[in-house]
Image (cartoon, rainbow, N blue to C red):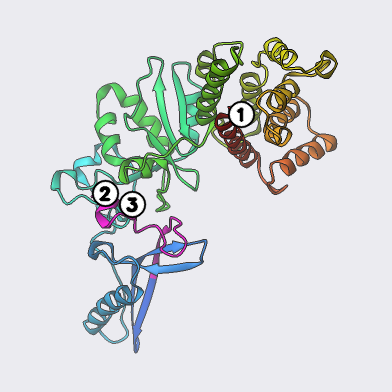
Amino acid sequence: MKATDYGGKNPLRYPTCDEYRYLNIKGVRSADGDKELGMKIPFFECRKCDVLTPVVPHLGIYDSRVKAEAYYKDIFKKELATMNPGELCSLKTVFEKKEFKHLSSVGFKYDSQDYYFIPGLLSMFGSDEGFLTPVFFDKKVLIYYNNLPDFKVVLSSFSRVHITNIDGTSLIPHGFGITRSGKVVCWLGDLHEEFSKPRNEHHLKIFQAFNVDSDNDIVSDYYYNQIEANFMDSDNEHKIFDLRNDFDEKVNKHFGFALTKFNFEELISDYKHPIINERNQINLAYKKLHSMLNETLAVDEIKSVLLKSGVTEKETKGLGGIKLFQLFLEKVIKLSDAKDLVCPLFVLYDLRILGEHITGSDSEEKYSFCKKRLSIPDSSDDLQVFEKLIQDLIKMYEKLCAAA
């Protein structure tokens, strides 16, 4: 069942603000005199609006608090009426702790309530029951594979990832998601199909070691793409690479020279994404990105075009690649905001320099200045700084492509 079967809008999205809500399964208690009954109830929680809404997914009740509360009150009332005086009981739904035995050979832990309560996962067909149950893993599983010589972790966005071997074949064909809480997620059915194969026994053991409890949150590009059929553009470095290629092609077409002096595709194949909030990984990414975006600029060709456009030798003297690029945008493409536009490239340069030096008070001051230029709080961690820089670089190249 797709989210579109609910009328075109995923019920997880809160009608007021359109944000994706969190599934929050909470214990609720009700009493009748000295009799008390407890039960776990699913809620959709909008953390932006601070609103908690009880839901009855199998009846399609997602935003009618009155109907949902009436449904659960009726259950409590009927069950309390059957209890003895002074009795304390817990009521379990049929969705709790359910095992999908036809998919159990891979031995992963999961919360079956995710399958029944998260919109779009439930299938009404027996053989597919439980297939789209999310299974969660510690993000460090990606570090493990990224450090193997025969494998590579490819993040097509910040929340969509593939683990591929040297011939480009994905370990799991549909890949994995990375949720808002930083967990890696995959469907139980896909894991069963691939890891039940004898040749993947080693991979099964690895993933079992990194298997963690569900936090009932699956929101990611992985979920959007496969459940909503909402194929969103990349929001990470891949988007930058695509935009840079587009811009290079436009410059070549309109101004007759190659902006990049190396084969950009070859550089991309060697790039490794930072996966967790670990400074060394992120610094290595800054170094590689600086090499790809700044050091590949064809300085001599840019300078030649500038001189032909009327810029004097004196104006270009001593300028590095980014400054020459800025001047090219100002004088040739005629962008009045070129200085502000290329700011992310200068921030990338500074972050690369900082990553190569021992940290100290002076480095921390410069790091704070980088955060200031990215318009993010000084308390932001290294991965948040990296992700904001990527966002700003994407916006920069989008504007350049539109202007070229």
Residue at mark 2: 2
| Residue 23 lies in the magenta-colored region | yes
* 3D distance between C-alphas at marks 1 and 2: 37 Å
At label 1, counting other C-alpha atoms closer than 10 Å, the crowd grade (few under 14, some 14-19, many 20 or more) is some
- Judging depth in this view, the residue of 241 and 351 nearest the camera is 241
Write the residue at 42% across / 35% down.
209
- Asked whether residue 185 appears in the rendered view, the answer is no
User: Nearer the observer, disc 1 or disc 2?
Assistant: 2
Name the secondary structure under disc 1.
helix
Residue at mark 3: 111
Write the residue at 26% across / 35% down.
192
- Asked whether residue 250 appears in the rendered view, the answer is yes
Q: Position of residue 52 (x, y in %)?
A: 44, 68
At label 3, counting other C-alpha atoms closer than 10 Å, the crowd grade (few under 14, some 14-19, many 20 or more) is many
Name the secondary structure under disc 3.
loop
- 125 versus 75 height, above or below: above
Mark 1 in CB contact with mark 2 (< 8 angstroms): no
Q: Position of residue 265 (x, y in %)?
A: 50, 16
Residue at mark 1: 281
Mark 2 in CB contact with mark 3 (< 8 angstroms): no
Mark 3 in CB contact with mark 1 (< 8 angstroms): no
Write the residue at 70% across / 32% down.
338
**Between discs 2 and 3, the one toward the N terminus:** 2
**Between discs 1 and 2, the one toward the N terminus:** 2
Q: Is residue 401 left or right of residue 198?
A: right
- Quarter of the image for residue 254 reads top right
Residues rendered magenta in the picture? 1-27
